[in-house]
Amino acid sequence: MTNATDLTQSAEPEMDEVELLPSERNEVIILWADIQRKYGDRPANGITVMEMVNEATARFLELGFKVIIDPSNLEVTDNDEVVVSPVMYIVGRVEKKSDGHDHERHSFEVQQGLEDGVEGAMGKNGQFLDRPGRIF
């Protein structure tokens, strides 16, 4: 048997552990496919598999998910070639890494007057409102 060169054989990620919103599910599938594409043509030796696991873990943390990737899932093709098909499990959520600016908090602080000392908000028409409330 030879070392596998295809890491892209694994099916859709296992997502039963954490309930995902449809948009999150799409993000997870796209990211997992991107990682598989990146490592799919590389030889499936221990170093490549660990690089893949480390990169995937870090990138999923950026999305806000804690994952476990099981690289021990092996399959044998019709050509007697061993193929590594890592399986990814989402096991929890973590706080997403932000872009550095919390827009909701900034809006709240401005409305409370913490930025310039003047309490209020701008209305939909651009007019100043004394009391922040619904401005839609």
Image: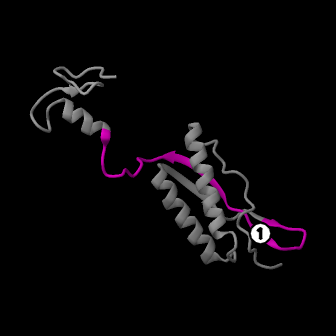
Q: In front here: 17 or 95? A: 95
Position of residue 91 relative to residue 69, above or below, is above
Position in image of residue 12 (x %, y %): 70, 51
Residue located at (62% from left, 56% from top): 32
Q: Quadrant of the C terminus?
A: top left
Give me the residue at 64% from left, 76% from top.
Answer: 46
How packed mark 1 is, by other alpha carbons closer than 10 Å (few <14, some 14-19, many 20 or more), is: many
Q: Residue at x 31, y 40 (%)?
A: 103
Which residue is farthest left?
117
Compare residues 80 and 124 and report the one nearer the observer.
124
Q: Is residue 132 above or below residue 53?
A: above
Q: Position of residue 48 (x, y in %)?
A: 62, 75
What residue is disc 1 on? 83
Residue 135: quadrant of the picture: top left
Q: Is residue 61 left or right of residue 31?
A: left
Instruction: Let me know if residue 44 is in the magenta part.
Output: no
Under circle 1, the secondary element is strand
> What residue span does the magenta drawing correspond to?
75-103
- Amino acid residing under circle 1: Val
Place of residue 108 in the rendered image (x, y in percent of width and height, measured from the top left):
24, 32
Q: Is residue 93 magenta?
A: yes
Find residue 114 and report its image quarter.
Answer: top left
